[in-house]
Image (cartoon, helix red, strand yellow):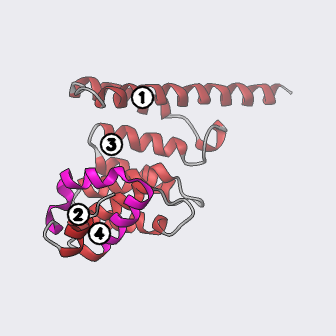
């Protein structure tokens, strides 16, 4: 009986640590929407999130999807722009069955930031035809395909993303990721379609 209580207490402690880490990461994300958070503040908050997650086992927390703790670690590293450090945790979460969707998206963004566009595409492609496919996945694949100078793939993914979320039509006009294919006829046609 005592060991059950100890296990439950440890599980509750770890759950609180995960929630605290989520709080630090939320403090980083919220100001990013309306102002620039000073780098030292951002890095301090991300480091605190990592500290909270140091001794947390994703299996023992019983909180969220299996890869959630790894996703949070990856997010913290991404917040500090330590993309290479984020990859291991994000790969773990993205490699689960079913994959952790947010971790897979973050993994692809890390690869992009590190200049590995081919790896960014490989990370997201399996989700493009899965039940977990979301408009943001298709839009990101369109961006990465454009940067890889694969205009047919880029336009195909972009058209599908716009079908799911018409707001991408406006966004694509300003997104520099599409600069390599701006003069491609199918991209120009997609821009000119009236909704």
Q: Which residue is mark 3?
A: 78
**Badge 2 local density, few (<14 within 10 Å), some, or many (20+)?**
few
Earlier residue among tags 3 and 2: 3
**Badge 3 local density, few (<14 within 10 Å), some, or many (20+)?**
many
Q: CA distance from mark 4 to mark 2?
A: 16 Å
Instruction: Tell me, yes or no, whether the two marked residues, 1 and 4, touch with CB atoms within 8 Å.
Output: no
The circle on residue 46 is none
Q: At 27% from the left edge and 66% from the top edge, which residue is drawn?
A: 190
Q: Nearer the viewer, mark 4 or mark 2?
A: 2
The circle on residue 154 is 4
Image check: 88 left or right of 130?
Answer: left
Q: Which residue is mark 1?
A: 26
Q: CA distance from mark 3 to mark 2?
A: 36 Å
The one nearer the camera, 95 or 189, is 189
Q: Main secondary structure of the magenta part?
A: helix
Image check: 13 left or right of 79?
Answer: right
Q: CA distance from mark 3 to mark 1?
A: 13 Å
Q: Nearer the viewer, mark 3 or mark 1?
A: 1
Q: Nearer the viewer, mark 3 or mark 2?
A: 2
Q: At 54% from the left edge and 28% from the top edge, which residue is drawn?
A: 19
| Extent of the magenta region | 153-181
Asked if 131 appears above or below 39 in the picture, the reply is below
Q: Which residue is mark 2?
A: 192
Question: What SS does tag 1 mark?
Answer: helix
Rendering quarter of residue 130: bottom right
């Amino acid at each position: 009986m005592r060991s059950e209580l100890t296990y439950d207490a440890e599980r509750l402690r770890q759950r609180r640590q995960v929630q605290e880490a989520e709080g630090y990461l939320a403090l980083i994300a919220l100001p990013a929407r309306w102002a620039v958070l000073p780098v030292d503040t951002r890095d301090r908050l991300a480091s605190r999130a990592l500290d909270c997650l140091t001794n947390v086992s994703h299996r023992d927390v019983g909180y969220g999807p299996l890869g959630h703790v790894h996703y949070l670690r990856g997010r913290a590293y991404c917040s500090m722009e330590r993309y290479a450090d984020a990859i291991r945790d994000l790969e773990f979460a993205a490699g689960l069955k079913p994959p952790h969707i947010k971790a897979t998206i973050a993994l692809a963004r890390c690869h992009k930031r590190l200049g590995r566009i081919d790896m960014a595409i490989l990370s997201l492609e399996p989700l493009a035809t899965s039940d977990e496919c979301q408009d943001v996945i298709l839009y990101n694949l369109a961006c990465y395909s454009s940067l890889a100078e694969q205009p047919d793939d880029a336009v195909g993914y972009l058209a599908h993303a716009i079908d799911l979320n018409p707001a991408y039509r406006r966004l694509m006009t300003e997104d520099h990721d599409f600069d390599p294919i701006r003069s491609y006829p199918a991209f120009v046609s997609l821009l000119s379609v009236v909704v």
